[in-house]
Image (spheres, grey):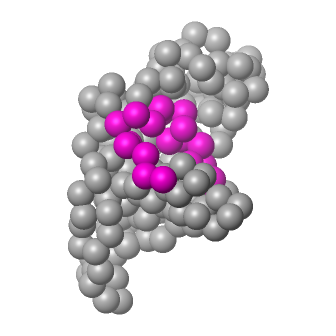
């Protein structure tokens, strides 16, 4: 791919990540690869956008209900997960800092990305498995009072859809 133009580092990083996703299925540790891609997207481009004051662009101020490609990921349905034991969780929960439930449809994409970033940064993540393979990931976020303000379960295929969507949103921004 050659050397990236320094002034366009964020765009080059995004395009390379998208190119790498095409190779993911042939990768032995494809779930790990996908989680690493997600982590990179939550940190580099989004911190870069915030630093450049692009965080209020129309694409990131969209409510999740407006993001047709990914809205199904954020349903509030209960799901059953098999870990060392079987248990049921809500697929997606948003709460205010006062522990009041918040409708995921009205959360902005930027709010979601910040919650997800915090989940990774504070290591509030838990992989799930099916047989001997990692199958999904649970992300959580707690406020300073210990309230769980965010919980999201994403299966591997949903994580890939989300990563591709975030890349395309970032690439669409002129900077």
Q: Residue at x 62, y 24 (%)?
A: 55
Residue 14 x, y percent position in the rendering: 54, 31
Quarter of the figure with residue 2: top right
Q: In what quadrant of the picture does the N terminus appear? A: top right
Q: For residue 71, which quarter of the picture? A: top left
* Magenta-span inclusion, residue 159: no
* Horizontal relation, residue 148 to residue 44: left or right: left
**Can residue 2 be seen here?**
no
Left or right of residue 168: residue 75: left
Q: Nearer the viewer, residue 2 or 38?
A: 38
Residue at image location 43% in from the left, 52% down from the top: 101
The foreground one among 82 and 102 is 102
Residue 44, quarter of picture:
top right
* Residue 67 located left or right of residue 148: left
**Residue 171 drawn at (x, y percent):** 50, 21
User: Where is the C terminus found, in terms of image quarters?
Assistant: top right
Q: Residue at x 49, y 15 (%)?
A: 58
Q: Main secondary structure of the magenta part?
A: helix
Q: Which residue is drawn at the image coordinates 47% and 32% (left, top)?
A: 108
Q: Reply above or below: 45 against 40.
A: above
The location of residue 100, given as percent across then percent down, is 48, 53
> Whole-percent x and y of residue 147?
58, 64
Q: Is residue 148 above or below residue 132?
A: above
Please give the count of numbered marks on the rendered protein: 0
Would residue 49 be seen by someone viewing this image from the given angle? yes
Looking at this view, name the residue that lies furthest to the top.
174
Q: Which residues are magenta?
A: 100-120
């Amino acid at each position: 791919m050659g050397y990236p133009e320094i002034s366009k580092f964020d765009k080059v990083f995004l395009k390379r990540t998208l190119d790498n996703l095409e190779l993911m299925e042939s990768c032995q540790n494809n779930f790990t690869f996908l989680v690493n891609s997600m982590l990179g997207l939550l940190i580099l481009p989004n911190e870069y956008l915030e630093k450049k004051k692009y965080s209020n662009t129309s694409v990131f101020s969209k409510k999740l209900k407006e993001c047709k490609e990914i809205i199904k990921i954020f349903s509030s349905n209960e799901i059953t997960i098999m870990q060392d034991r079987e248990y049921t969780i809500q697929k997606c929960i948003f709460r205010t800092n006062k522990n009041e439930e918040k409708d995921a449809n009205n959360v902005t994409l930027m709010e979601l990305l910040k919650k997800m970033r915090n989940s990774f940064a504070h290591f509030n993540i838990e992989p799930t498995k099916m047989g001997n393979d990692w199958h999904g990931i649970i992300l959580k976020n707690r406020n300073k009072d210990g309230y769980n303000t965010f919980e999201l379960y994403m299966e591997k295929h949903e994580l890939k859809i989300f990563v591709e969507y975030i890349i395309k949103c970032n690439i669409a921004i002129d900077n």
